[in-house]
Image: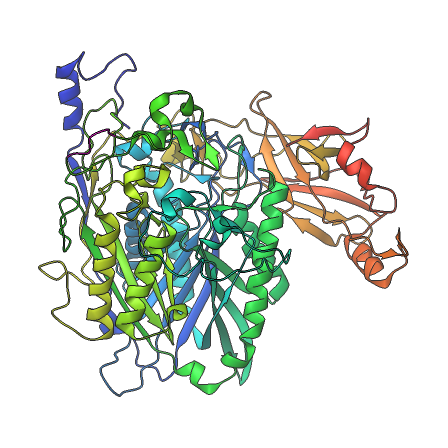
């Protein structure tokens, strides 16, 4: 990563600055399109589904909260990607040809086109061409967790001083994700089954609200979100205007497999729009936040090893309805969303049982867009991307400390609008003017795919509610479908921050200030989706907005060359001998567990059990990508595994202040009290079944596995019969606090 010295501003050392700009000489990645001619002409739709772990070692920066993001010291949950490969049925009639698409949902802050290209390259090389899915058919969808790993975006403004506490771009981090996801795409494609698919849609209330309601009301033409009073399905209370002014549609694509005439659940792809950043920015652990808890919840409720992935929808101005910024609240909201996904999945059972659900076709199209000075029907995008000063202060639900500076507050704008960016008062970085392709991406993709009777479209940004709904409406009109059957997945393929409408932009609230290419951005993406939909679903060869027409022709990706920091180490000991700080072994060392597990009370008031052990010191920014230490809790009497860190209730972390000291914290899901006549009834069969499954009152132990395996001494699991609610809220003298 290229950095100027902190004392060096452009006006003070112009010669050095000019040389520094030479470092922005581009590096180019070339991508090949899919070889769809190699697709088999099969009479039914086939599908392959898998899930991969992309959790890196501790020591990288968390991404999403800017300079207030912390360095990861461990993990609350593992970071995962879910891969859904769909190859459409070929009926032999009409103009429908075999087509395929890989939809990949990932626990990432936002997608990187460099990662997407590396995934496509990995698939092509590792499969030796057997998998006909190229860069135009592998769609990377980020959940937008603010507790994912960083360093995967080479553009200066995404790795510079305002990006995180540990800055820098590292191609090794990119390759870590690309290798695991690429291998997953190959596995999913090669293990496809005869499938049955069905879409379901419903309105889901009580999860989010519009945080920029003033900007929402600036829209002269807005969807009918406020036309009738709607009640919260959980509280039965009327929704506030801020809650009503969101796209509340939850969409689910259910994928089942046929095996010998029997049908079994295989995968679930859900799309819902809300910012999943519930946990505060002082968090130091990797996790999937709201969507991570939701996908775990839905998968557990469905069972049978089904894979559940959740893509973010229209969420640019939609904040979560959280009561506190803590993991407990993220879990509560995630369980609410996951439960709704499960209910909608269950309601689709009748549809996937119909024979026609196996005749679903896949029709997809992909297009890379070059943004600087791109035309719209009434103007152009700006030549140079610009971040507004108001963006520095953060959004209303997650303000930053930079708001102490007057210019970093919402609504700060130019008194006299002018130039392409009109009202926007731009942030001046230490490198001077922003350049598309150097400081921000200049090329981003969009896509549309019709799977069965539903359409999923993609956007490489975070659209506000009105901007996103206008795109959905435009595609639905072109495809002649009801609005509910068109889904928009944001944060897919690339990332150019926000897209506010032309009416919202002049206020320069957080979303408008983060609309990089100016006030025409929403119109541009709407028109591009319209054109792509006409070319795809109507067969209009002249529908392309861009000339020459480049549908399904991935552009070379250009980003700044060189200067990257090597943050992680991979490979064997011989490969890493030139890196002084890289350990010379493949599996992490784990020492004997000397101290007995102890009861702790987490910062958000949850009873937990903690065990500590000696291990390798966490090296900030220079850690390896070997397999992680695994932890599980088992019952002593029969060695039944009760829980593991592959779920959501065992966190693993290092203590940076005590090098080489590690800890795991287990937050058991205690049985729910069953009340009879106002007092707890512990003899109730439902309570007793939960208590028996968990092992209440029995002895358990932690098992930590690295290069060697070690067991803790036994500890007794206390449940509700010995622990009152007062204990959970106030704690006890013998409990100490833990993250």
Figure quadrant of residue 612: top right
Q: Looking at the picture, tell me which residue is in the foreground, 575 or 224.
A: 224
Q: Looking at the picture, tell me which residue is in the foreground, 239 or 542.
A: 239
The answer to whether 648 is drawn above or below residue 476 in the figure is: above
Q: Quadrant of the N terminus?
A: top left
How did the renderer colour the structure?
A: rainbow
Q: Quadrant of the C terminus?
A: top right
Q: Residue at x 87, y 42 (%)?
A: 722
The answer to whether 29 is drawn above or below residue 427 in the figure is: below
Instruction: Determine whether, in the image, residue 198 is placed left or right of residue 15.
Output: right
Residue 77 position within the rendered picture, expressed as x and y whole percent measured from the top left: 56, 45
Which residue is the extreme one toward the left? 548
Residue 250 seen from this side: yes
How many numbered circles are shown?
Answer: 0
Residue 265 position within the rendered picture, expressed as x and y whole percent measured from the top left: 54, 72
Q: Residue at x 17, y 37 (%)?
A: 384
Region rendered in magenta = 414-418
**What secondary structure prevails in the magenta region?**
loop
Q: Looking at the picture, tell me which residue is in the foreground, 87 or 212.
A: 212
Instruction: Determine whether, in the image, residue 42 is placed left or right of residue 15.
Output: right
Instruction: Determine whether, in the image, residue 303 is placed left or right of residue 424.
Output: right
Residue 639 among magenta residues: no
Residue 428 position within the rendered picture, expressed as x and y whole percent measured from the top left: 24, 25
The answer to whether 256 is drawn above or below residue 657 in the figure is: below
Q: Residue at x 48, y 40 (%)?
A: 626
Residue 597 seen from this side: no
Instruction: Determine whether, in the image, residue 107 is placed left or right of residue 419.
Output: right
Residue 519 position within the rendered picture, expressed as x and y whole percent measured from the top left: 23, 44
């Amino acid at each position: 990563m290229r950095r100027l010295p902190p004392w060096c501003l452009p006006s003070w050392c112009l010669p050095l600055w000019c040389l520094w700009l030479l470092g922005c000489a581009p590096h180019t990645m070339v991508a090949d399109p899919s070889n769809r001619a190699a697709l088999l002409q099969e009479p039914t739709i086939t599908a392959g589904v898998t899930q991969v772990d992309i959790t890196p070692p501790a020591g990288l920066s968390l991404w999403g909260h800017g300079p207030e993001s912390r360095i990861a010291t461990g993990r609350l949950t593992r970071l995962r990607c879910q891969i859904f490969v769909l190859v459409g049925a070929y009926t032999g009639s009409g103009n429908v040809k075999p087509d395929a698409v890989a939809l990949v949902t990932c626990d990432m802050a936002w997608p990187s086109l460099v990662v997407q290209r590396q995934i496509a390259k990995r698939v092509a090389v590792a499969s030796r061409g057997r998998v006909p899915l190229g860069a135009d058919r592998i769609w990377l969808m980020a959940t937008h967790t603010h507790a994912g790993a960083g360093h995967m975006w080479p553009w200066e403004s995404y790795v510079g001083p305002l990006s995180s506490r540990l800055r820098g771009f590292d191609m090794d981090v990119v390759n870590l994700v690309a290798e695991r996801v690429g291998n997953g795409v190959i596995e999913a494609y090669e293990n496809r089954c005869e499938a049955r698919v069905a879409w379901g849609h419903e309105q889901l209330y009580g999860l989010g609200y519009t945080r920029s309601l003033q900007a929402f009301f600036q829209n002269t033409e807005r969807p009918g979100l406020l036309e009738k009073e709607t009640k919260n399905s959980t509280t039965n209370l009327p929704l506030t205007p801020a809650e009503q002014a969101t796209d509340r549609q939850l969409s689910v694509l259910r994928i089942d497999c046929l095996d010998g005439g029997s049908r079994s659940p295989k995968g679930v792809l859900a799309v819902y729009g809300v910012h999943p950043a519930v946990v505060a920015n002082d968090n130091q652990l990797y996790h999937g936040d709201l969507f991570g808890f939701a996908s775990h919840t839905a998968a557990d409720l469905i069972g049978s090893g089904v894979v559940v992935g959740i893509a973010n929808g229209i969420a640019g101005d939609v904040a979560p309805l959280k009561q506190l910024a803590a993991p407990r609240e993220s879990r509560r909201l995630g369980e609410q969303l996951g439960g709704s996904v499960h209910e909608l999945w269950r309601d689709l059972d009748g549809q996937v049982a119909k024979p026609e659900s196996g005749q679903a076709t896949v029709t997809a199209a992909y297009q890379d867009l070059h943004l600087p000075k791109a035309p719209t029907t009434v103007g152009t995008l700006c030549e140079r991307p610009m971040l507004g000063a108001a963006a520095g202060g953060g959004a209303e639900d997650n303000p930053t400390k930079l708001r102490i500076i007057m210019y970093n507050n919402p609504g700060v704008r130019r008194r006299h609008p002018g130039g392409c960016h009109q009202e926007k008062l731009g942030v001046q970085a230490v490198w001077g003017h922003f350049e598309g392709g150097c400081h921000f991406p200049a090329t981003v993709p969009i896509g549309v795919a019709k799977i069965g009777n539903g359409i999923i479209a993609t956007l490489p940004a975070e659209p506000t509610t009105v901007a996103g709904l206008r795109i959905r409406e435009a595609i639905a009109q072109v495809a002649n479908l009801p609005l509910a059957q068109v889904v928009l997945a944001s944060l897919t393929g690339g990332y150019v921050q926000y897209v506010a409408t032309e009416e919202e932009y002049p206020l320069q609230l957080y979303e408008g200030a983060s609309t990089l290419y100016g006030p025409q951005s929403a119109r541009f993406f709407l028109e591009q989706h319209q054109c792509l939909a006409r070319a795809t679903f109507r067969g209009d060869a002249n529908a392309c907005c861009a000339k020459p027409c480049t549908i399904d022709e991935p552009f070379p990706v250009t980003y700044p060359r060189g200067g990257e920091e090597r943050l992680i180490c991979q490979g064997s000991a011989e490969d890493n001998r030139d890196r002084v700080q890289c350990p010379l072994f493949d599996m992490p060392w784990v020492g004997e567990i000397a101290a007995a597990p102890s009861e702790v009370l987490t910062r958000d008031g949850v009873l937990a059990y903690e065990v500590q052990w000696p291990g390798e010191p966490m090296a900030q920014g220079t850690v390896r990508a070997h397999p992680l230490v695994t932890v599980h809790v088992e019952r002593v009497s029969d060695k039944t595994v009760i829980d593991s860190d592959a779920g959501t209730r065992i966190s693993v972390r290092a203590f940076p202040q005590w090098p080489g000291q590690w800890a795991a914290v287990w937050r058991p899901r205690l049985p729910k009290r069953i009340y009879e006549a106002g007092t707890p009834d512990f003899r109730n069969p439902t309570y007793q079944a939960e208590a028996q499954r968990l092992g209440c009152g029995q002895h358990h132990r932690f098992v930590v596995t690295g290069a060697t395996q070690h067991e803790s001494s036994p500890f007794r699991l206390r449940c509700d019969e010995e622990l009152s609610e007062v204990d959970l809220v106030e704690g006890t003298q013998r409990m100490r606090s833990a993250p």
